[in-house]
Image (tube, rainbow, N blue to C red):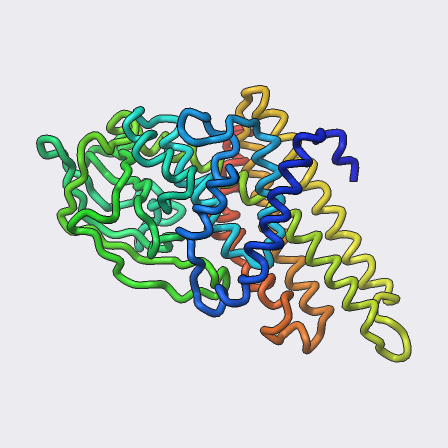
Amino acid sequence: MGSEIYFNKEHELVRKAVRDFVNKEINPHVDEWEEAGATPLHDLFKRMGDLGFLGIRYDEKYGGEGLDYWYETIVLEECARIKCGGVPMAISVQSNMATPAIDEFGSDYLKQTYLKPALKGEMVAAIAVTEPDAGSDVAALKTTAVKQGNHYLLNGSKTYITNGLQADFLTLLARTSDEPGYHSFSLFVVPTNLPGFKVSKKLDKLGMRSSDTAELYFDNMEIPAENLIGIEGEGFIQQMQQFQHERFSVMPLTYVSVKEMIFETIDYLKGRIVFGKPLIKKQVLRHRLAHWLAQAESLQQLTYHIVRMKMAGQDVTREISMGKLLGGDLLNEASSGCLQMYGGMGFMNEMRISRMFRDSRLISIGGGASEIMSEIITKTYGF
């Protein structure tokens, strides 16, 4: 409601194009991809790239559309209408996680060789930060990249890597110095077709089942020195900036998913007769749904506020951290509560609510757990 305040006719044309693509080219295949445990990303991304959906806010020189953050928000909102969490996550890895650091800090060579094909959907990208012993504590990562002449020697492993089985390249954070502190890490573009790269295993997840997730292994893998993103030793700082794009992408996914979940639940409750009356007549259920709708609307307005801040060039670290924290809590509460309203039917895998319940659980964990978001917020207030 009131979207005309934020979006003009050009915005709505893009919205319709993305929505039509989602309804015709993605949603009919979601059940099949969920069952298969993967989505054919090379095919899907090529079609999305041809339509300009992957690089909406990136420079036209590198295959983008050169549009603003409002257009990006529209694409994220419409991808949230995909009838699962795994496919939107795979898309946002491509457009909001693996590519921003290359765009912001990479050389022209890296942009032409990797960013441009990624935005056109000709290459699948993944972001490789998390390790078996380093998740939220990014500074604890152990994967090393040692400079030797005109290349770096990469050794170590990464885990929970979305798109990991299909990626043509990784945007990877590695330790380039044994010195303590945050200036001992560097970001690299790592092509997966070089010797020394191995997919250790495909991971079996609770939810997001249409998204392939992998554990990766690097054994004396030689990475060309020109694949360093930006300046050696600045990778940790660059990655912290990248996280803002990643965490922002979660917010439209959350409020759109919550609203869709609630309206589907309302339809079910209208048709479910208990003790002679539709379940929707139960005040306690109506009030819970109203509460979650109010929270979803609040999160949407915070998101739009962040877009305005980004358009003004302001720091949005605090607000994005707040949005991800609130979004994770809301998804957990609403998906669990809506499933409860379905009763026994909610426990059946054939119902979309069971998929939403499983997929929702990741949002307060991945890309920075809720506890980390809380810590960031406290630091921005100085306590």
For image coordinates 77% across by 58% down, the residue present is 288
Instruction: Point out residue 255 in the picture as x, y percentages from the top left corner.
Output: 66, 47
Q: Quadrant of residue 94?
A: top left
Instruction: Point out residue 105 in the picture as x, y percentages from the top left corner.
Output: 35, 26
For image coordinates 32% across by 30% down, the residue present is 112
Residue lying furthest top in this view? Answer: 312
Q: Is residue 217 left or right of residue 27?
A: left
For image coordinates 86% across by 71% down, the residue present is 278
Image quadrant in which the N terminus is located: top right
Q: Quadrant of residue 141?
A: top left
Q: Is residue 311 left or right of residue 86?
A: right
Instruction: Point out residue 382 in the picture as x, y percentages from the top left corner.
Output: 52, 28
How many numbered badges does the structure rendering display? Answer: 0
Towards the viewer: 383 or 222: 222
Q: Is residue 101 left or right of residue 187?
A: right
Query: Can residue 204 be seen at all in this image of the molecule?
Result: yes
For image coordinates 43% across by 40% down, the residue present is 97
Towards the viewer: 40 or 81: 40
Q: Vertically, is 253 above or below 145?
A: below
Towards the viewer: 299 or 192: 192
Query: Can residue 383 be seen at all in this image of the molecule?
Result: no
Instruction: Point out residue 24 in the picture as x, y percentages from the top left corner.
Output: 60, 55
Q: Quadrant of residue 228?
A: top left
Residue lying furthest right in this view? Answer: 276
